[in-house]
Image (tube, grey):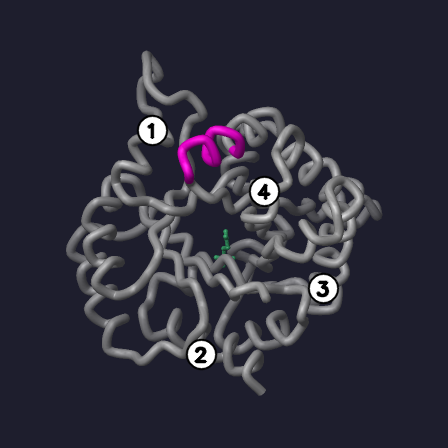
Amino acid sequence: MRIPIIAANWKMNKTSGETRDFFTRFSEFPKPGPVEIVICPPYPLLSLAAELCQSGGLRLGAQNMYWETAGAFTGEVSPLLLRDLEVQYVIVGHSERRQTFAETDQNVSRKVKAAFAADLVPIVCVGETLQQRQSGRTEAVVEEQVAAAVGGLDPSQVRRLVIAYEPVWAIGSGLPANAGDAERVAIFIRRQIGNLFSLKVARDVRIQYGGSVKPENIADFMSSAEIDGALVGGASLDAAVFTAIIEAGLGVRAS
Ligand code: PGA
């Protein structure tokens, strides 16, 4: 059985004081289980968040990393340092990195391999732009991104992978995908992994939906057995709202 995974992508938000406040407020709400809750703060907040995650039973994730372990790469952060800071997950290939920072499929592939080598679990983001969707290329785009991300991995690594299907047009727009469409893409991805590896491997891969997830719509996505959780941006910044997302998402699983 796949354990649901709901991750908070804080992007370039919060100070250390705001981070402490978030964890204090978040700890006030009871969490239904079983679920993995992952908090992905900006790099400079990782060690503070590591402490706070540990006492709250939460997992820690980073939003990015470089693929080399050390060296002359000014401004970059290595997988080894993330591991040293008790990070367990790392977001790779977010559309903001792909679009604003020219991240390519080849870079995503390097980062995924480097993450596994450092015993970090990558959360690989895939998804089409509005233009690609409108020209009927959603599956082709996602297929190419997934193929690049899993190429050269061992089945044992792929089984641990998390894939976040995030249509680019749904991110930060307030316009989430239709749950049926998201489910269809999740099925498409799982079938692709099945063809590339095996059904057994495909059954273990966790697939999240991301893009304007809110307490009001998470149940639409998580009521599908194909969608194992969510990658939440804006709505993860407020502890009460993020808690409401977790409750509504898991509530639909329990019913
Ligand atoms: P959003 O962002 O929830 O603010 O749409 C999601 C993401 O970028 O992962």
Q: Is the magenta stretch mostly helix, strand or loop?
A: helix
Determine the CA span between mark 3 and mark 1: 34 Å
Q: Name the residue under label 2.
A: 247
- Among the 4 quarters of the image, the one containing residue 219: bottom right
Residue ID for mark 1: 77
Q: Is mark 1 on a helix, strand or loop?
A: loop
The verdict on label 4 being within 8 Å of ligand 1 is no
Q: Magenta stretch containing residue 116, yes or no? A: yes
Taking depth in this image into account, of 104 and 148 the one nearest to the observer is 148
Q: Give the range drawn in magenta.
A: 112-119
Q: Where is residue 226 in the image (x, y as percent from the top left)?
A: 68, 65
Residue 207 among magenta residues: no
Q: Is mark 3 on a helix, strand or loop?
A: helix
Figure quadrant of the N terminus: bottom right
Q: Residue 53: horizontal and vertical position, in percent? A: 26, 58
The residue lying at 59 percent from left, 59 percent from top is 209
- Report the residue that reaches farthest toward the right: 136
| Mark 3 vs ligand 1: CB below 8 Å | no
Q: In this view, does 245 lie above or below 150?
A: below
Looking at the rendered image, the disc whose residue lies closer to the viewer, 3 or 4, is 4
Mark 2–mark 4 Cα distance, whole angstroms, equals 31 Å
From the viewer's perspective, is 241 left or right of 5? left
Residue linked to disc 4: 156
Query: Which image quadrant for residue 93?
Result: top right
Kindly identify the residue that appears in the image at 42 percent across and 65 percent down. 235
Count of picture labels: 4
- 186 relative position to 76: left or right: right
- Label 3 CA crowd tier, 10 Å (few <14, some 14–19, many 20+): many
Q: Mark 3 points at which residue?
A: 183
Return the disc, 2 or 4, that comes first in the chain's sequence.
4
Q: Which is more N-terminal, label 1 or label 2?
A: 1
Upstream in sequence: badge 2 or badge 3: 3
